[in-house]
Amino acid sequence: MATVSLKNVKKRFGSTEVIHGVSADIADGEFIVIVGPSGCGKSTLLRMVAGLETVSEGVVEIDGARVNEKEPMDRDIAMVFQNYALYPHMSVRQNMAYSLKIAGLAKSEIDRKVGEAARLLQLEPYLDRKPKQLSGGQRQRVAMGRAIVREPSVFLFDEPLSNLDAKLRVQMRLEIRQLQAKLGVTALYVTHDQVEAMTMADRMIVMNEGRAEQIGTPLEVYEKPATLFAAQFIGSPAMNVVSGTLEGGQAVLPGGARIACCTAHEGPAAIGIRPEDTHADADGALEMAVDIAEPLGATTLLHGTLYGTEVAFTASLPGVHRMEAGTVLRLAVAPAAIHLFDPETGRRIG
Amino acid sequence: MEKRVTFKGWLLPLALVFPQAFISAVFFFYPAGQAVWQSMFIPDPFGLSSQFVGLGNFEYLFSDPYYRSSFVTTAVFSTLVTVVSMVPALFLAVLADRLVKGAGTYRTLLIWPYAVAPAVAGVLWMFMFNTRVGVVSWYLGQLGYTWNHVLDPNEAMGLVVVASAWGRISYNFLFFYAALQAVPRSLIEAAAIDGARFWRRFFTIVLPMLSPTTFFLLVVNIVYAFFETFGVIHTITSGGPQQATTILVYKVYADGFVGQDLGSSAAQSVVLLVVVGALTVIQFRFIERRVHY
């Protein structure tokens, strides 16, 4: 059990800076998901916490103690790798016992701990198999088992589910979350999948190009994205962002639609509207020309443009709607569902 | 899907196969056949006639203590050459693999010895250890050790082993280095997090991952020591002293071309042929069973 804190952590490879100063305080037992597109530096950040990459600047603390110069083995952490990194020549039992053997534990103690972890992960029937004789999900469990037996203070996950099929991913997502809650261990979990981030995180760190765009609970990030990037990265289908202007407390969209919103700002702005925040309304302020309707069963996605413009727009309406291409639809948006961003900096302004 | 090329006539395929078949026939099947044939005859001292003796040459061979001791010499020699060429190669590869800067330079330098022909390497070592003018033997003399591989069988064996293994280190280094680079980084990292320090990681994770390469090199080096070290032995010791460095392949030459006993020499070739065959079978059996995890 431990806290983790990052203080203005930077990483440079040669003269290229890839992480430009990330700060975060992670509470004991918290499940933190670091999410972002590939190449945003999320794995590098995790590897710095693990001690597999050196920290170029700033401080990484685990349980209040600076660990920058500590070896991975001395940081009291365990890590689950994307490719699981199971030792292929060892059986499941040996894989899990490896760290305990190195730590010099007695044989009976090792057997007890491995047995316990195996029971917890339902791996008992497979203890004497080699990793190549296991399915993807089982390998994943062994990797977790190997991490659990060490009883670390911090669990690190580097995209652990990305090699699994969609169905198994949903199941493992739940299992990892339950396991973490049961053990009460602080966890850092890296993923590029925003659904994983939304469903698993206590809080998430949204990363883009080496910067933490926003740190907050999934709902905070969804409801009040701090930047344009966070707004478009979280949420599916992605938020509509159109450039418009703010005039006297109204947002003016391309095509001339005016939507009331509560802001004192004036001038150009990036206006964000989530597809699911629109609803069909004959008196609505928005007019949309539909190109394609995608019925998903519970909802229907409508792709098209704002009427009279070339600006792409997506709406999501509950229920099944069949629509010809070219249909013009009036939509209403609640003032509270309008997200406003500075077009220069991408920061939220209202 | 296997792609099959079909030919319309017989002429083109035959023409394509011919060069390979011709070379194999002239340089392999014909001499091998000749060896088997000759191994059943004893020629007269002037080579004018020969007498059929069946397996007599083989009977004579295996009752010859010199021949049997040559088997032991070969076993000792090839074991030593294999160990002396593989262990330092692995060590050097591990060091080169850890390098961040200048890896390319070290790699190139370490591969150079492989470009030196065995006979030339033999001459080089012979000069260095020459009992009268050799640099190394002079220094050894200064240290109070009298080096004389012309008289001392152990020193002779040591010298031919080192001379044979020297160039081979480069070859083995290359394979080990490539294999080390192929070990997934995450495995090493996982082991590091699990608390294993460098040498522990090496022996428990890296070495087992190298096992297919190690086994391949083991077989290849044994075959090398059996057959390709002729040049080194010929230039340095010529099989002496008292046949202490006469390995099987050298004895084929010594008995056949120096001793002019063509029948026995042919019989020895046949025995060697069987040994090569056995080694090859072992190699394929094992490697196929051991294809990467």
Image: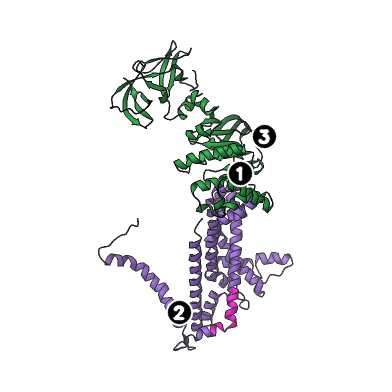
- Give me the disc on residue A63: 3
Residue B61 part of the magenta-drawn span: yes
Q: Quadrant of residue A326?
A: top left
Q: Which residues are magenta?
A: B60-73
Q: Quadrant of residue B74?
A: bottom right
Quick one: which chain is green? A
Amino acid bearing label 2: Ala
Question: What's the CA distance linking mark 2 and mark 1?
Answer: 66 Å
Residue farthest left in this picture: B8
Asked whether the residues under marks 2 and 1 belong to the same chain, the reply is no
Q: Residue at x 65, y 47 (%)?
A: B195
- Give me the disc on residue A106: none
Q: Which residue is mark 2?
A: B35
- Against B44, residue A84 (above or below) is above
Q: Nearer the viewer, mark 2 or mark 3?
A: 3
Amino acid bearing label 1: Ile
Instruction: Give the class, few, some or many, for how many residues have Cα within 10 Å of label 1's Cα (few <14, many ≥20).
Output: many
Front in this rendered view, residue B239 or B139: B239
